[in-house]
Image (cartoon, grey):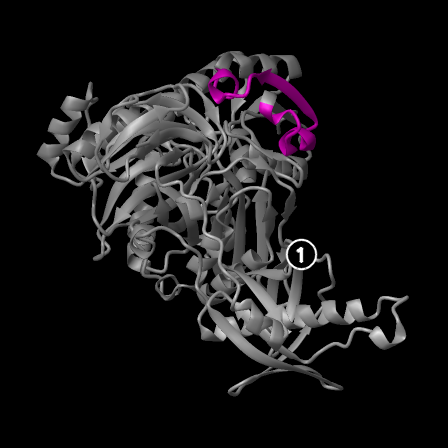
Amino acid sequence: MFKKILIANRGEIACRVIRTAKKLGIPTVAVYSDADRDAMHVRMADEAVHIGPSPSSQSYIVIDKILDAVRNTGADAVHPGYGFLSENAAFAKALEKEGVTFIGPPVKAIEAMGDKITSKKLAAKAGVSTVPGHMGLIEDADEAVRIASSIGFPVMIKASAGGGGKGMRIAWNEREAREGFQSSKNEAKSSFGDDRIFIEKFVTEPRHIEIQVLGDKHGNTVYLGERECSIQRRNQKVIEEAPSPFLDEKTRRAMGEQAVALAKAVGYHSAGTVEFIVDAKRNFYFLEMNTRLQVEHPVTELVTGLDLVEQMIRVAASEKLSFGQKDVKLDGWAIESRLYAEDPYRNFLPSIGRLTRYRPPEEGRRQDSTVIRNDTGVFEGGEISMYYDPMIAKLCTWGPDRTTAVEAMADALDAFEVEGIGHNLPFLSAVMQQERFREGRLTTAYIAEEFADGFRGVEPDEASARKLAAVAVTINQTLQERASQISGTIGNHRRIVGHQWVARLGERAFELTVEASADGTYIRFAGGGTISAATDWVPGRTLATFNIDNHQMAVKVDLVGTGIRLRWRGIDVLARVRSPRVAELARLMPKKSPPDTSKMLLCPMPGVVTSIAVKAGDTVEAGQAIAVVEAMKMENILRAERRATVKRVAIDAGASLAVDELIMEFE
């Protein structure tokens, strides 16, 4: 076994590898950039080495700097994690030359399968069905348009060295093909140092299903079932699960055997993933092979009971697999939700800043036999940087069946507290409640179809609104009773706690009566209906459990002025509980109008304005690209919403802006 492992990565995956190495008793070395000086993976490792400035192009993907860290610490093995150098054949070769073990596949397999173009040619040669496309390199946007037109729109423009959704665009017409080619090329160069692009047919209404393979250096290769990864946004996975609710055993076996055959054809060992596009009739087509550990590997671990990082380490140390294909059993169901530093109310634009509160739900097995797991690389008080991927954590749940696992995920998301930045927790909660998701009717277009107009939060139905009204009144009653106990008041001016209230949630108003008895507290609604309520909430607690009609609800609570902000199941509402007379007067109060920003282009996210396409006096048309903002390795094209004339441009290209800072004004 190895004496010391260096992890050539950062964040959540570095922490993940360190945990398994510690379990095996192997010392670890972390590497870090300026931005990660105080990161969690640095704190967890036995040693840490600084490797350069914050941009990954000057630190994490500079091979010489990683090699220097290896030499200086005496590490005899390197785990690359995912992203960065994990599928870089030159890096694996450099380690081999140094006599250091690369905890991953052989160089030839990386070269053959890590390159998307080469892998498709090899797959076709091996008889694996592939998606139609142009496998040669594309020189410029004009050629990209010609090729896309010949294949037939829509097409997928992809980086040859890509992964994680970076350097990928769907083009539905010639204009999008031209713009998508350049954006994909730029992102690929920034993220991977390789700007080669290829184009393939985009299969409409597809499912993205991948097979986990694992092989040793002695010719033994197995597949560990599949993962359903269809719920994606901007080609980046958001929710994954194992197994897939769509596959039958026959298709699962066929895909698994084909994945193993492909792996053996290139002499593959270590953990790897063969990705397929599956159509409505369960026809599957080879998409690509990721010659590394996948982000979503925890769901496979939860249903197989295997530690994939441990298996990678043992395989790299030339150990044989301790099990065969017949020993692989899938037990139960696992769901993974990726928590991103992206604001769903701003079209999922990146968000950066300090985590003023970060409290994940408690990990481990719960009383109902479900399991909660949270893979993360951040901590309360830490910074979310603009330089790296926006993923904060991977929240996973396991249950004996899919329905139980989904419900456990809904509960876990309710109990997850994140403050200080924009994040997608409410969006994830909303998906868990959707009938289509619960039925397993998934495609890669799921988010685009279900949230065609973007995410605006969840509007509570009548039943949910009543529950939250009961929660708000219960909180208000606690506050009123606490205030009545303040000492030193004049005897005949003591606060009398009322029992008649009006709870307003948005446009809904409920007239309520609170009745306390030996059996508990009951909230009676005018017009009929009674809800029993109990809680452990006390002022200052931001997450509390409410027992509403004998159903446990984990609700996030914030007191905002005279209002009560409640967040639950993707619902985010400001409740106001007033006496009937005050409620009557409140209805007469004028509403303040928001400021008019209709003639301004404001920066939608913290980032760097990489280009400005217009100048003062120019006339722009609706849909025209007018600026590009880069944040978290993603290019975001800002377009004119309507025809207008530019009055002034407030900043120059290259400026770093905060959210809502002015970029330009229109007449």
Q: Where is residue 67 in the image (x, y as percent from the top left)?
A: 55, 14
Identify residue for label 1: 542
Q: Give x and y (percent) for residue 152.
A: 11, 38
Q: Which residue is drawn at 61% across and 61% down?
A: 563
Confirm whether the magenta stretch covers residue 602.
Answer: no
Relative to residue 502, is residue 290 depicted above or below? above
Count of picture labels: 1
Q: Quadrant of the N terminus?
A: top right
Which residue is drawn at the image coordinates 44% and 48% (left, top)?
Answer: 345
Span of residues in magenta: 35-62
Q: Is mark 1 on a helix, strand or loop?
A: loop
Which quarter of the figure has residue 516? Answer: bottom right
Residue 329 position, x and y percent, is 46, 56
- Report the front residue among 320 and 415: 415
Residue furthest to the left in view is 150
When asked about the image quadrant of residue 42, the answer is top right
Q: In this view, does 128 lie to the left or right of 111?
A: left
Camera sees residue 383? yes
- Crowding at label 1, few (<14), some or many (≥20) Cα neighbours within 10 Å? some
Q: Residue 61 magenta-drawn?
A: yes
Q: What's under tag 1, amino acid-wise? A: Thr
Point out the image quarter for the C terminus: top left
Question: Which one is nearer the viewer's eye here, 329 or 134?
Answer: 134
Q: Which residue is drawn at 48% across and 32% down?
A: 606
